[in-house]
Amino acid sequence: MAVTLLVGVAGHSWRDWLESRLSNRGLVVADPAHAEYGAPGRVLRVVNRKIDSWRLVGTIDFLRNPVGWLSGIGELVEDGDVVVGPIVRDSPAARYSILAMAQLVGADQILIPKGCFAEDWGWPVGPEVVAVSTEFPDMVKDAQRRARWLELIEDCQIHEIHLADVQMMGARLGSGVRAENEFGLGEVSGGTLHLVTREMVDEDMISRMLDEFHVSKVSLVHPRSYHGLICSFAHQNGADFGMGVIKRFDELRGVMEILNTAVVPAPVRILKIGSFRVDSKGKEIGEQGPWTV
């Protein structure tokens, strides 16, 4: 059975089309900002209006993590699925990412809203132009996302994760070799010492660390920078099984206190950390810069 790709366009919605035509086909929600089926920040496969499987993207903007976004979609999509893409933008990065997604899912049918500027982008198959319904206002979508974030937090339990016991993905922390020091949690990678510390480190201290760890740069980050970041627990094969947010980080012990939907104790093998942050009331408080934490 063919895979159908629905191209997302600002101001347009596939809601009515899906209600009338989805039938018993699987639905892959490839827009991490989508919040109809649960917390955003991930891509989902939905069967009979229930989440079947998902992968964390770690942000509501797919272009901030295109690798995680594409790999997640590739792991979820099955023959016969309908894929709803994120909102297309008139930029080279968006164009090439969306086209890569269309190729990755093996779309045999591509539907695009009438009047969309992306009709001539060079899709794997010629798009069919259709009339669709109007999207909800941004204010409504923002409120829906906040409600989903709050719902997520309320469904969580507290987990204490020792970073030495898990692999980490999505953050700079966890990508290097541990560097024991007196100030906090340090790692060396690519000629840089990444140091998580709440201490006031002066230039003399930095100079000593440059010599001691044979690096050319020291990257300093406060442990509070991790608070509120969305995250997930995953098995060794990368399959996510619990979503949540980082509540507290004790850098001296190398322990994160995480609110997560998984049941305690959770068999965490991989801790995936996103760049998007929310507070305890479900309010979105923005992004961390790429590879800064």
Image: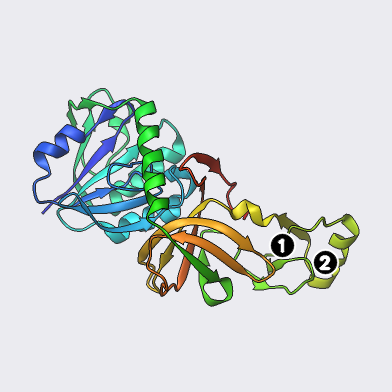
Residue 169 visible in rendering: yes
- Residue at numbered disc 1: 195
Horizontal and vertical percent position of residue 142: 40, 33
* Disc 2 to disc 1: CB gap under 8 Å: yes
85 relative to 133 in the view: left or right: right
On residue 209, the disc is 2
Local packing at callout 2 (Cα closer than 10 Å; few below 14, some 14-19, many 20+) is: some
Q: Nearer the viewer, mark 2 or mark 1?
A: 1
Q: Position of residue 2 (x, y in %)?
A: 13, 51
* The quarter of the displayed image where residue 249 is located: bottom right
- The image position of residue 15, as x and y in percent, is 20, 35
In this rendered view, identify the residue nearer to me: 289 or 286.
286
Helix, strand or loop status at disc 2: helix
* 49 lies above or below 119: below
Q: Is 243 placed left or right of 73 in the picture? A: right
Up-down relation of residue 10 to residue 227 (above or below): above
- 212 left or right of 237? right
In the rendered image, which quarter contains the N terminus?
Answer: bottom left
Q: Residue at 69% x, 55% y: name it.
A: 221
If you read the primary sequence from the N terminus, does the residue marked by circle 2 or circle 1 appear first? 1
Disc 1 residue crowd, few under 14, some 14–19, many 20+, Cα 10 Å: many
Residue 35 vertical placement versus 103 (above, below):
above
